[in-house]
Amino acid sequence: VPPALTYDELPRALDALRSAENIVIACHINPDGDTIGSMVALALGLEQLGKRPTLLSSDGIPQTLTFLPGLARIQTETDARNFDLAVVVDAGEMARVGKSRAAVESAPVLLDIDHHVTPGPFGTINLLDARAAATGEIIYDVLTHLGVTFTPEIAQCLLCALLTDTGSFRYMNVTPRTMALAGALIEQGGSPTEIAEEVFEKRTYAMQKLLGRAMESLQRTPDGRIVWAHVTQADFDEFGATDADTEGIVGAVRAVRDAEVALFFREMASGKLRVSLRAHDPHDVASVAQLFGGGGHRLAAGCTLNGPLADAERVLVNAVQDALYRENHIRVFGEPPTVNHRWMAS
Ligand SMILES: [Mn+2]
């Protein structure tokens, strides 16, 4: 395995973990494989050292991750306030621990472990590194430094963190080190086959039907640069679908050849439209989402618009066209005048 990442505050983090006894570990709301895998792997390692970890997931455990070992330790909330140390994994910001916040903030020391480096560290001790493809990579280093034995359970949790946060090792965040760690984790008993089957191949009937409706609605601009799709509230009602059943749709829209920006519109019961925006490098959809009061990352963002659906689609597609034009204009001529779309935001 290539050398570990280096963190300025690693010695302080290790001291804090070694000296604490009651440790509360919190993951982020709407949890994914990285935050759950990182939290459980860290807890299993700390238990080897005789610690008593309390695991908090404000939003519980998504169906797709229920195969992971060690999940019985996770609770959605706690009244306990006797913690020596709090650890928050993969959250980006404190607000994203949800209702775990009171327990986390009751501890005298807060360790923030993350590969999201914006909006910035919020711990008293911080292990942040954007070069890590997943927070699980940082947890791997921490457990190694603590002298923990990598059991098959720990390996499976960390492999799940790496595999899910890299889109099965396909995203730009993958490094040689990511692959080397994955190899080590397989040697230690992790199973990529089990993770892939559980996470990607147990889609619900409603998910597949919604995906069908979305693909049926697919449209694109004449130049093919912008592609979009929608599902209506009627589709949701017909299949008894929930928000979780839209998983994978925006990725399917983005996968259209020559698409530079993909949009997915989800009609809500209120009549408003929740929109997921995805860009291929080097485009920036966060700036478009921000025009409508939303936000996100350059390549993945979201916002909410007023209905009806057809108007929202027209307005947002126009805004993306403006943004693509602006990007080109800035490259060639410098800053053009700005366009204000804020009036359409819900
Ligand atoms: Mn992550």
Image (cartoon, rainbow, N blue to C red):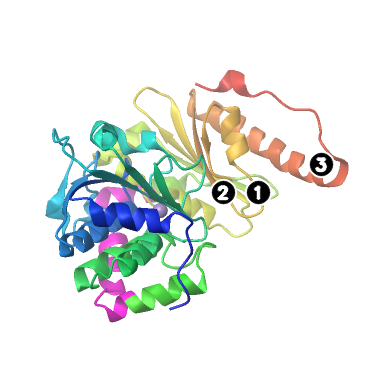
Mark 2 vs mark 1, CA separation in Å: 7 Å
Q: Give whichever of discs 3 and 2 has the lower sequence position.
A: 2
In the depicted structure, whether residue 13 falls above or below residue 59: below
Give the total of numbered labels: 3
Q: Quadrant of the N terminus?
A: bottom left
The stretch drawn in magenta includes residue 204:
yes
Q: Amino acid at mark 3?
A: His
Residue closer to the observer: 310 or 332: 332
At a point 81% along the width and 47% down the height, the residue shown is 331
Residue farthest toward the bottom in the current orientation of the protein = 187
In the depicted structure, whether residue 14 falls above or below residue 87: below
Q: Give whichever of discs 3 and 1 has the lower sequence position.
A: 1
Q: Amino acid at mark 2?
A: Leu
- Residue 133, how many percent across, how many down? 46, 61
Question: Magenta part of the protein: which range?
Answer: 185-211
Task: Kindly identify which residue carries mark 2.
Answer: 299
SS majority, magenta? helix
Task: Kindly identify which residue carries mark 3.
Answer: 329
Q: Is mark 3 within 8 Å of ligand 1?
A: no
Residue closer to the observer: 45 or 262: 45
Direction from residue 226 to residue 63 in the image, left or right: left
**SS assignment at label 3:** helix
- Residue 141, how many percent across, how many down? 37, 66
Res. 51 image quadrant: bottom left
Mark 3 crowd level (few <14, some 14–19, many ≥20, 10 Å Cα): few
Proximity of marks 2 and 1: CB atoms separated by less than 8 Å: yes
At a point 60% along the width and 42% down the height, the residue shown is 285
At a point 31% along the width and 44% down the height, the residue shown is 244
Mark 3 vs mark 2, CA separation in Å: 20 Å
Q: Amino acid at mark 1?
A: His
Task: Kindly identify which residue carries mark 1.
Answer: 283
